[in-house]
Image (cartoon, grey):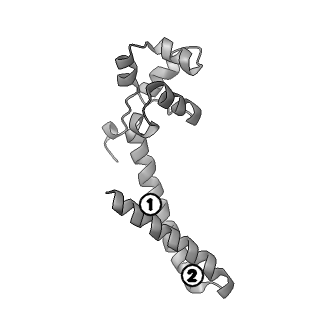
Amino acid sequence: MGNQNRLVNYVRARRKRAGLSQVELAFILGYRDEGVISRHELFRSVPPLLIALGYEVVFKTSVSELFPGLRETVENAIETSLAEFESALRKQKNQAARSQLPVITRKLEWLNERRELQETKR
């Protein structure tokens, strides 16, 4: 992830394609000035969820497509956390009381189902 260009977003490109100014887009999203739009476009700040969804509605483009670099960063972090979680569950399973085995087994099954689904999408 070391490449700053990976943290790209397409808000500016979509705004320009729509012929909107930053002031107009700010107004549509409920902001009083355009500074926040500029910060989002330049990736100086990440929009809150409701505003990210607002961009999605305005441009009829998913948040993941508008902010692919951010999505990739989040995906990598979550996948790392899930791998650590799975490793911890496997250790727990070896030491767990019999009553806890079904709960741990179900979580491991879910992780496996998720991985299989991910592999079929590739």
In front of the other: 87 or 29: 29
Helix, strand or loop for disc 2: helix
Does residue 20 appear left or right of residue 109 in this picture? left
In front of the other: 94 or 50: 50
Q: Residue at position x 55%, y 29% from top?
A: 51
In this rendering, the answer to whether 82 lies above or below 44 is below
Q: Quadrant of residue 77?
A: bottom left
Does residue 2 appear left or right of residue 26 in this picture? left
Residue 121 point in image, percent of width and height: 35, 57
- Extreme residue in the right direction: 99
Q: Quadrant of the C terminus?
A: bottom left
Q: Which residue is mark 2?
A: 93
Under mark 2, the amino acid is Lys
Q: Residue at position x 56%, y 71% from top?
A: 107
Residue 40 point in image, percent of width and height: 46, 27
Q: Residue at position x 62%, y 84% from top?
A: 96
In front of the other: 88 or 60: 60
Residue 94 point in image, percent of width and height: 55, 85
Under mark 1, the amino acid is Thr
Mark 2 and mark 1: Cα distance apart in space = 20 Å
Kindly report which numbered mark, 2 or 1, lies closer to the viewer in this rendering. 2
In this rendering, the answer to whether 119 lies above or below 93 is above
Q: Residue at position x 53%, y 28% from top?
A: 54
Q: Which residue is mark 1?
A: 80
Q: Report crowding for label 2: few under 14, some 14 to 19, many 20 or more residues within 10 A (C-alpha).
A: some
Residue 68 point in image, percent of width and height: 38, 40
